[in-house]
Image (tube, coloured by chain):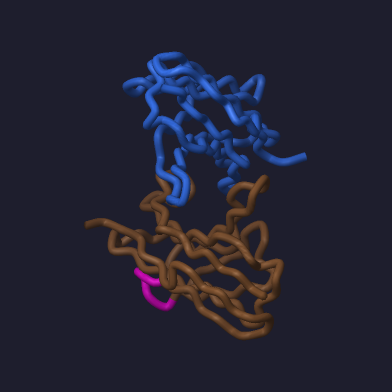
Amino acid sequence: EAQVTQNPRYLITVTGKKLTVTCSQNMNHEYMSWYRQDPGLGLRQIYYSMNVEVTDKGDVPEGYKVSRKEKRNFPLILESPSPNQTSLYFCASSRQGIEGEQYFGPGTRLTVT
Amino acid sequence: QKEVEQNSGPLSVPEGAIASLNCTYSDRGSQSFFWYRQYSGKSPELIMFIYSNGDKEDGRFTAQLNKASQYVSLLIRDSQPSDSATYLCAANDYKLSFGAGTTVTVRA
């Protein structure tokens, strides 16, 4: 089954404790991206990647890091999480970059206390 | 000003009626537009995309684009309770920008 997977689905952590949210897709898509979704603000892009070893900032990159060492994986790293990073996070992939359909993962609900 | 604006709703329509969702965008360079549906607690899924001015129909859904007015709309005909969800509009210029979404409730 073609899909985007994320882990963990739910995470409660404390301020400053480094964490990684994994994202993997099995559709051989070159384009992958991370979004956060907050009430009233919609989906905002954090980082995106056009291909392996090619990443760039989205609208809200502060406090986040990404890497793209393999085509299928695009982990999101929070080096020192803060409460304002409490949000719902979605990973997405696309065959045609921003021109095509974005396939979203199931989401990761992160709470930072 | 947000790049993509949507009526926040909620929009409540009776079963069988037409639900009309509106979206405006600020960047005249936007080339393509997408409507995603997001059920509560789920991830967004694509319903339709439109590139050219005019209407595009797919089953009970019709997307309308007016680039001169920087306006995109989505009509849902014969609304069903299963259409109850949040609908996200997205515009693509050099990046993909999403609106905050309009929540639709279809009353049985």
Residue A108, how many percent across, how many down? 48, 64
Q: Residue at x 60, y 69 (%)?
A: A111
Task: State yes or no: residue B15 in magenta.
Answer: no
Task: State yes or no: residue A70 in magenta.
Answer: yes
Q: Considering the image in quadrants, where does the N terminus of chain B appear? A: top right
Q: Which chain is brown?
A: A
From this viewpoint, which residue is outermost toward the front? B108
Count every numbered label the image shows and give the total. Answer: 0
Q: Colour of chain B?
A: blue
Q: Residue at x 46, y 51 (%)?
A: B41
In the picture, measured across the screen, residue B60 lies left or right of residue A59, that is left
Residue A48, how many percent across, how many down? 53, 62
Query: B36 above or below A102?
Result: above
From this viewpoint, which residue is outermost toward the bottom? A17
Residue A3, how many percent across, how many down? 30, 58
Q: Considering the image in quadrants, where does the C terminus of chain B appear? A: top left
The dominant secondary structure in magenta is loop
Q: Residue at x 70, y 75 (%)?
A: A82
Q: Nearer the viewer, residue A14 or B98?
A: A14
Query: B54 above or below B33?
Result: above
The residue stretch that appears in magenta: A69-73
In the picture, measured across the screen, residue A38 lies left or right of residue A89, that is right
Residue B10, how many percent across, how many down? 60, 31
From this viewpoint, which residue is outermost toward the left? A1
From this viewpoint, which residue is outermost toward the right? B1
Query: B86 above or below B108?
Result: below
Q: Nearer the viewer, residue A56 or B102?
A: B102
Q: Residue at x 38, y 20 (%)?
A: B57
